[in-house]
Amino acid sequence: MDNFIDYYKVLNVSYFATKDEIKDAYRIRVKETHPDNKNGDSKTFKIVKEAYDLLSNDEKRNRYNDFLFKYTKVNTPVNNFQREEVPPKQSTSAIRSDTKKKVWKPLAVVSLVVNAVLIGVAFWGYSQLIEQEYIITEIQTDVESVTKELSDFQVDYNTLNGLYVSLENEYREYIEQTETKDVVKEATNNEIPIDNTEDISKIVANNPAGAFTQGSSKDHVKKIMGTPSSLNKMPLGEETWWYGGTAFVNFNEEGLVEGWTDIKGDTLKVQ
């Protein structure tokens, strides 16, 4: 009998405990003895489950009680664990009073809970509104700051753009003057007579920058195309300059371009 287990003590219930009391005690003991709990262990946990399995079954519990009181020192009769206590009769007014208490208490609790929830929701909504207003204020401040920076940048951009346009115009004037000087120099080297401004304009038009055209001088063509690969001289002073085997330029007796041929279409830089 040393190994006998008093399952009532295991669940910490009396010998007269009802099924609901046994179930509530079992839930508490399971949590306390579960192996995952800090103070729990698997052996006690298993015994707790055995105790509930036995005491929650009427047939098993009766047999256990017979054994418990016949062969152990426990001498309290417990086979009447299923007895029901008959409550004393109450007057009609007392019953109505109890009924009102039973009805109003839950309603009061529900009312308190609902009010608490509503207050919580209202407070949360108010806090959210304040937070949103703060965020909107920050965004507006950032927008104003960015707008001011963009305005300052626009002023700086307009200033720099004006300066750039002025420098570009000066550069174009300089290029035009330089090209005019180069063309006049080429005309002088080629002994082309220059009598007036119209002659200079005509020479500039016939010797565009980066290309040659009808009326361009030999020096200008050579400046644009480089030294020809070969040339043919005619009796009357005309010349033909070859660039490769598919492109050539014809010069008249005055040394000015009078025509060209470019079979590939991309060898000569003409305008």
Image: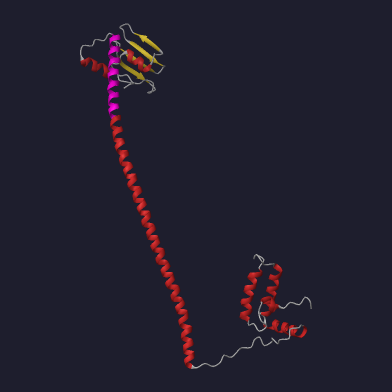
Residue 85, compared with residue 188, is above or below; it is below
Taking the spot 31% from the left edge, 39% from the top edge, the residue there is: 152
| Furthest residue toward right | 1
* Rendered-image quadrant of the N terminus: bottom right
Q: Is residue 140 left or right of residue 6?
A: left
Name the spot of residue 215 as percent of width and height, x first. 28, 16
> Which residue does the image show at 33% across and 15% down from the upper left?
220
Frontmost residue, 197 versus 75: 75
Residue range in magenta is: 165-190
* Residue at the image point whose x is 69% and y is 76% from the top: 10
Image coords of residue 184 (percent x, y): 27, 13
Location of residue 57 in the rendering, given as x and y in whole percent from the top left corner = 67, 81
Residue farthest along the top direction in this orientation = 235
- Residue 131, located in which quarter of the rendered image? bottom left
Quadrant of the rendering where the C terminus is positioned:
top left
Q: Is residue 189 magenta?
A: yes
Q: Main secondary structure of the magenta part?
A: helix
Judging depth in this view, the residue of 95 and 150 nearest the camera is 95
Residue 253 makes an appearance in the image? no
